[in-house]
Structures are given as C-alpha cells and as structure tokens.
Amino acid sequence: MTGGGRRSARSRGKTSTNVNEDEDKDALHKTKPNSKLRRVKTQDHGNALRILNANLKAMLSFGIVATLIIFFLLNHLISPAEDARRPRVVTPFPAPKIMDLPQFQGEHKESLYWGTYRPNVYFGIRARTPRSLIAGLMWIGIKDGRYFVRHVCQDSDGLSTYGWTRHNGRDFGHQLLVDQDMTLATSFLKSKMDGSGYGGDWAVRIDVQSQGWNDEMKKNVQLFFYLADEDGNSLSLGRDILDIHRNSLLASGLRTDIGGWQLHLKSKADLEVHYSGFRTPHIHNLSDLVRETLASQLMRFSRLQLPDIIESSSNILVFQISGRIPLETDIVFVSGTGINSTGEERMSNLAGMSLTNQLKEKRGEFDAKFENCFRLVDKIKSHDDFLLYWPAELYTAVPSRPVFPRGFLWDEGFHQLLIWRWDLHISLDIVGHWLDLINIDGWIPHEQILGAEALSKVPADFVLQHPSNGNPPTLFLVLLDLVNGIKKNKFTATESNEILSFLGQAFVRLEAWFQWFNTTQSGKYSGSYYWHGRDNATIRELNPQTLSSGLDDYPRASHPTEDERHVDLRCWMVLAADCMDSIGKLINKENKPGKEYGSIVKLLSDFDTLNQMHFDHASGTYFDFGNHTEKVRLTWKEVMVGNNHVNQELVREVLEKPELKLVPHVGYVSLFPFIARIIPPESWILEKQLDLISNQSILWTNYGLRSLAKTSSLYMKYNTEHEAPYWRGPIWMNMNYMILSSLRHYSLENGPYRDKAKAIHDELRHNLIRNVVKNYHQTGFLWEQYDQEKGKGQRSRLFTGWTSLVLLIMAEAYNEM
C-alpha cells in the first residue's frame, strides 16, 4: 500500500520508539583503531511508477522538488497519440506562478538567499538555489571512551538537548547543543554591505564549553567545518592554512551566482587546523567520507587527524579545528571578492568584537519582536515504477529536524498560523511555494522529500505517493486568518496590498485545489466525502489506516468501501469553501458555474443534513459512516512463506459480517463539527460536545485531550504486530489547539453554554501549557505527542512543528473560521 498520511514512514514503523535503528550505524565508535567500516548500501525501489523528490531545505527549507508518486496505469491509460505527451500527474498547473509576483523578487528574494536551510544536520547553511555552495559543522562526541561523529540529526546520538533558541527566519539565529558534558552554541548572522556578492556575506560563531574538566579526553574538542559545491566547481585551499593566526583564509572559489568568495577562520584561541579535500558528487554521504578518513588515520598513525591532503579538483573541503575547551571561533564567508574587493573590511566586520555586538543587538531585536507579536508577559504565569515531478522550488517549515526534515502538507497550515504572525512575507513565500506545486489536475503531493540528504532518512516503501490521495487542506487555515485580518484592519496598507496581490495570483490555483478535493474525494451522496487510499484487501491491519487523513491509524470503518462518509473531511471542505468564498469576495472574483462557494458553504454547514449523515442521538456524538463491524481481531496463525516455510504471524480475523452503519469510535474526528463551529450556540448538541470533551472517562486528561476515547474498542491497540498506537490515545497539540480555538469561540457567543465553554477552555489551556513546559524543563525538547496517562513527551523529539502551537495557546491567539 502506498503512503498517504502525514507521516507514513513513521506510522508504519516497527515500534513506538522514535529512533531509526539503522541510523545508529553512523556512529564513529565503529571507527575505533582496527575497526572495519561499512558503506551504506543502496536499495532497489522496485518497478512501481513513482515520483522522487529532489528538494533541499532546513529550519525553513528550499530546493528542487521531485516528489515520488505511484499510480496505476489502468487508471491512466494513454492513447498512442498521447503517448509522447507528459502524463497529467506531472504536468504543472497552467497559470502564472505565485512566486513570480514582484513582492517575491528583488530585495526580498536576495535577502533570503543564504540561510540555515538544511534541517537534517545539526548545523548547515545553503542558498535558495537548486545547486548551491553548502556549509556545515561536524564534531567528535565522546561517550564511554568511544568516539562518535555528530553531523546528521538523529535521536540515537543521545544529545541532551539541541535546537534554535532564537531564529528570526531571515538573518540571525542562535542554537544550543548539549552532547554529554560538552555544550556547543552556534550563532548565525548575515550581512549585506557595499561590495558583497548576491545574497551578501555570513558568519558563524562556534562557542564550546565543557563540564568534564577531570577527564583529559574531554578538555579538547575536534570540530569539522566544511564547504561543498553541489555544482562540482573546484575549491581552492588557502596558502597558510596550518597557521591561521598569520593568514585567516581557509578557502576560496568562484560561482556564477555570487562571484568570487572566501572563507576565513578568526579566533584568539590556540587552534590546530588540518584539512582534507574530496572530489565527489555524493555530498549527502559527507559523514562517511570524514569518518572513513579519520578511521584510516587512526589505523595507520593512531591519531584522530585529517591528513592535510586534497584530491585533484576537490569540490569538498573539510577543515578540522582542534583546541582546548573553552573555545570560541568565528567562521566568516564573504562573497563578491575579486580584484576590486578583497572583502577584508567586510570580513573584519563579521568577526571578533564586532560580531559579538551585532549578535547582541540581534538577540535584543528578536526578544522585543517576540514580546510584541505574542505579548506573553501579562498572560503567562509560572507553573510547575516512477515518474519524476517537474523540477520546482520549495521553501517550507519542517516538523522535526532529526526525524522529519522535510515538508508535510497538512503540517504546513499549522506552522503558518504561527509564522504569519512573526513574519508575514516569509509566510506568504512559503504558502506560495506550496501552491506552485499544484499539478494540472489540482493535486499537491502531500510529502516533500527534499534531495538526497532527506531521501536518506525515508524508507523506500514510504517514498511513493498516489495522485488520488489527498491530505487535509490546512493552508486554508492561514489564508482565512489573513483574509479576516484584512477585514479587521490588522495589517498595514502595504501588507494588505501584498496579501491581496498574493490572493489574486493564487486564486486560480486555490480553485483547482478545491475542485480536486470536491470531485475526487466526494462520496455517493451530495455533501459526503471520504478519504481515498485505504487498503480494502489488508490481512494484517486490525483497522485499515487512513493515512491521507493525517490521522493515520485513527479507527474508521472496518471494511473500506465507496460507501464511507468521513465527518472530518466534510468539515475540512466547509473550511475550504468558506475560505474560497471569503477570498473571492475580497478580490471581487465573480462566481462561475459549479464554483458558487457560498452555496457550497451553505450546503455543507446545513445542521440538519450533517446530523442525518453523521450524528448518533443515543451517544450525542458525531461519527463516520461505513461498512463496519466491531468484531475484528488479530490472531496468531501459521502463514506459508516461500518454499514450504511456515511463519507464525498476526493476521486479521473478522468474526461477523460488517454492515453499513455509524462507526462508534469517539475521539478527535467526532469533534470536527465542533471545531468547524457548525453547531449552533443554542443547540443541546453543543452541550453534549462539551460533556464529551470534559469527561475524564472519555477524552479529558490533566495533560490535554486524548486522541481516542478510553471507551473505544481500539483504544491504545496495536494495528499490526509492530505498529504501536499512534492516534489511538496520545495527546496531539494541533488538535488540542483547534479544539481550544472553538471553545474560545463558543465562550464568546450568546447562548446557554458560553460559561461552560469558557471554564473548559481555561482549564484545558492551563493543562496543556503546564505539561509542555514541564516536559521542556525536564528534557530540553518539545515532543511530537504526549502520553495521555502521565503526560510524558514521546515519539519524535525536537518536534518544533505544530507542537510549537503551544506558543499561540499561551498568547491566546486562535485561528478564526
């Protein structure tokens, strides 16, 4: 079955832990003297048709898209006359690109050229261009007397904490990484001065401290800073590289985008510098190159030192910077160098005391803007066979650097609820990039696997995407926020004009996206919808997953058919239609036949029709509808494998014939009509929803609302032998945020339940904030989800994607519908 959910690679992993076991093989402890090194083997992805993603990105990512799609030829028969033409699924939507708008060109585009756009490494820099000069940091970690190379973010490294403590998304960031007894602080700063090349100059400050003063091994640090040219241009080594106090130049080169460039190392510390140069197109395997070189040196000379040798026409240079802790060093990149500009003045401006002062100023600006945006001081008190997608750019936020360093469509709408409040232009830039990925049929691939680095983190089985499967259209959440912001005069005149220009250019693409949902995901009856992509032939899943919904293993009808009606998708369509209607009125777009969005909103938000399709009067709850039986279980059976070989496997067993009916599982999906605010404030059904939310025997916990009720037959049940419960109990921040938003809405509406809604809102908000903050203080991380029994963070850590919505919860800044 092809992946269609938000995190298909994870949802079908073997265990509930957040560590890819294979990634553990990257550790340098494999390179102790006399140890053997193993190279990474490539895997055959099979004969299926698929689209391979080639984007590059980071905290905010960028690159070349080549998303993997699988689709069945029987559904896409091509006549001989059409055979020479491009298949529709990889044909771009025929409309002007949003990113061609003037507001995304010129100074705006250049100001974002360089950045920390490599989220899968602990620290990395690249440009917003398909093939860039890239830079990054590695270091040697020591644990139990063994050496480990740190480079790619992975939980198996066991860092106590890491992540950006400040980052303005443009020209400044500060990150803290704690590896055993060693603490590394990395600061990033961009500058544009007279003489700079395109995109300007940048500097990195690395500050290393340690608590392991009694251990001689821990008094020294081995850092590795590298430059690599993805275009294969050769890099030149500085002249006196072994004596950086005499000459700070490490490397130089020439590129068509930025002109001549130089890399300098400035430090008052007593440093020792060594180097290696490599010629290879496989930059994503850079960790292996360094590890193998160090291992060879250890075996031959018993020293952990690069050999001071470069291959002919090296396009990768790695500099080993060794010194005693504490250590502080500045690395400065200047562009536009040449006969008329050596960059000496600009280099001095980005090092030493000058850099210290600029970083201090940026920290102050960040803190002031943070308070101005979110105003937390008065609100928070202390508490304890494949096809390549066409080459395209993508600038995106990412959910988690160690586990999901790539773009996810349904995550992105939640990300932007926070980002637009911080930097409107960056938010529009990101949303525009996503909308420019729409193909001619109106489909957007839900997961963007960006380049070889990101692809190396994704199992081959989950790279495939099916063009009949969708993903929640959460981008409408942020677009509706922007529309409502204009109506309420929240923006300056310039900002409002830029938003209107954006919406005008985007409207035809949004129409295509909406129509794709409204036609391909529609059900048998008017106003009904169901998520495509469920496996109706599975013999190993207790309940076939609905990956395209984003809620993966949340229980749906036991037997997938076209008769299904999914209440959450119906509510997403209400949001989408309402947003399209609002945008159309704002930019004075005339309704076209079949695109009367106001009429669609009226149809889908009709309370009586909704209740006829999805409401269960006995329980006062909204449910999906489909071909269902509760009598399904996993049973150990002998299964024939290969030639007369028998395995014991858990196999799905159905004990009674399913029938068409409401699917009786209470959880997040049940609350979507409440989230979409379709329920009238005076209706008794609203009180029933409030009772469901606040009932400790159903959804309520002291840490947030659980994803599935304790009363569900599938509560905390494994879906296969190895698939731990995912959306079957644990607490998720994105859904709690949306529920809080609606609680706040109903607390302000005239009706008999406003006081009850306010009381529940206040207590739920308090519980969520207290638990996330407590976990952060204990672990140093935001987590993907939180255990519903004890509140402990679990699954992926450093999950600064939608879990960062806790900031908006603190600020009481909710989305509007």
Image (tube, rainbow, N blue to C red):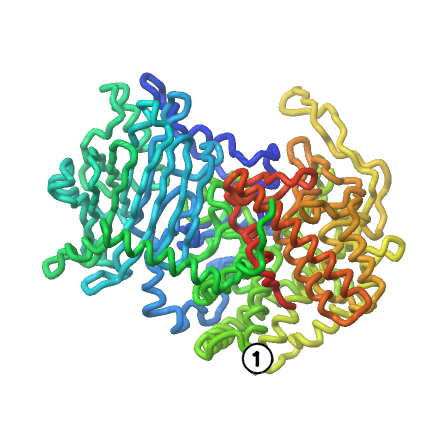
The residue to which callout 1 is attached is 586
Q: Is residue 4 visible?
A: no
Report the residue at 55% width, 55% height from top: 807
Residue appearing at x 72%, y 61% in the figure = 758
Depth check: 212 or 205 in front? 212
Mark 1 lies on a secondary structure that is: helix
What residue is drawn where x is 45% and y is 32%? 157
Question: Can residue 661 be seen at all in this image of the molecule?
Answer: yes
Q: Which of these two is toward me, 531 or 294?
A: 294
Residue 623 image position (x, y, % from top left): 79, 54
Binning the other alpha carbons within 10 Å of mark 1 as few (below 14), some (14 to 19) or many (20 upward) gives some
**Toward which corner of the image does residue 151 lie, by quadrant?**
top left
Which quadrant of the structure image shows residue 762?
A: bottom right
Q: For this rendering, which residue is in front, 128 or 488?
A: 488
Residue 761 in percent (x, y) is at: 70, 58
Question: From the viewer's perspective, is 146 left or right of 676?
Answer: left
- Quarter of the picture holding the N terminus: top right
Q: How many marks?
A: 1
Residue 426 in the image: state x and y as whole percent: 44, 63
